[in-house]
Image (spheres, rainbow, N blue to C red):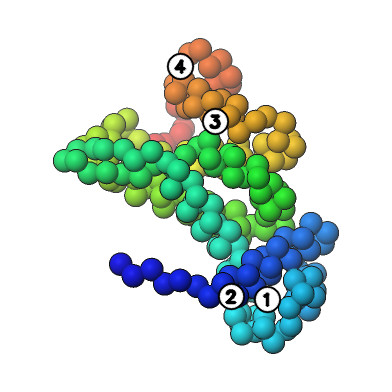
Amino acid sequence: MTVIKQDPRVVKTQTNLRRALVYLMQHEKLENISVQKITKTANITRGTFYLHYRDKQDFVEAAMNGIIDQLFEHVLEKGTPREVTDGKILQTMSVSETFSYIEKNADVFTVLLSGQQNRYFYQQLYNRLTEVITNYAKGLGTDLEEIDVPLRIQVAFITSALLGLIIRWLDGGLIYTPRYMTSSLEKMLNNFASSHLLIISFLDFQTHNGLEI
């Protein structure tokens, strides 16, 4: 497969525009940020902006998808490949690198995952994580443990749990290290069904009268 190398000048322009967007979002709502403010902050002309994007919405979506692309490119590259049935190799996602990457780019992810200001970024991140986990699970084939729960529900649980944990970690000021977060998540998932995790007893799994399955 031929890898198309981007013009370094284009990459620099896109990077500066993304940084400008994040900076502005730290100070005002997205709907109040104009193309003029973005280009002025990025120190580029409006003409250059419109060479790459149709309008503000096109740019915002491209910028956020670019941030997500960079995240997954990094954490999937760092994951340890896993050999499954018939010698097939599946790529895993490094949880520790995920927390480390987000910590290093906390200003970006704090802004983009905060409150209801940017539902688009959360949804795209959720969709991408769902996609990579689903592809991995399907690749397991007969190695996938059956627990009588549809795959899409299992994936939704893991995706929501991981993103929810990341958001709370950011909201709490990153007081725990990436290593501690990785270890804690591993313990919780490994022991989720265990009676030793007493907080789970808060959830009543009994089927009550009148509730259809």
Reply above or below: 57 against 119. below
Residue 56: which numbered mark, if any?
1
* Helix, strand or loop under label 2: helix
Residue at label 4?
194
Residue at label 3?
182
Of badges 3 and 4, the one in the foreground is 3
Labels 2 and 1: the sequence-earlier one: 2
Q: Which quadrant of the rendered structure holds the C terminus?
A: top left
Residue type pointed to by label 1? Lys
Of badges 2 and 1, the one in the foreground is 2
- Distance from the alpha carbon under mark 2 to that under mark 1: 17 Å
Q: Residue furthest bottom?
A: 47
Whether the residues at callouts 3 and 4 have beta carbons within 8 Å, the answer is: no
Labels 2 and 4: the sequence-earlier one: 2
Place of residue 6 in the rendered image (x, y in percent of width and height, measured from the top left): 50, 73
Q: Residue at x 58, y 59 (%)?
A: 67
Q: Residues within 10 Å of mark 4 (few under 14, many from 20)?
A: few
* Helix, strand or loop under label 1: helix
Q: Residues within 10 Å of mark 3 (few under 14, many from 20)?
A: some
- Distance from the alpha carbon under mark 4 to that under mark 1: 49 Å
Whether the residues at callouts 4 and 1 have beta carbons within 8 Å, the answer is: no
Residue type pointed to by label 2? Val
Count the marks: how many?
Answer: 4
Labels 3 and 1: the sequence-earlier one: 1
Residue at label 2?
10
Place of residue 87 in the rendered image (x, y in percent of width and height, measured from the top left): 19, 41
- Distance from the alpha carbon under mark 3 to that under mark 4: 19 Å
Reply above or below: 22 against 167. below
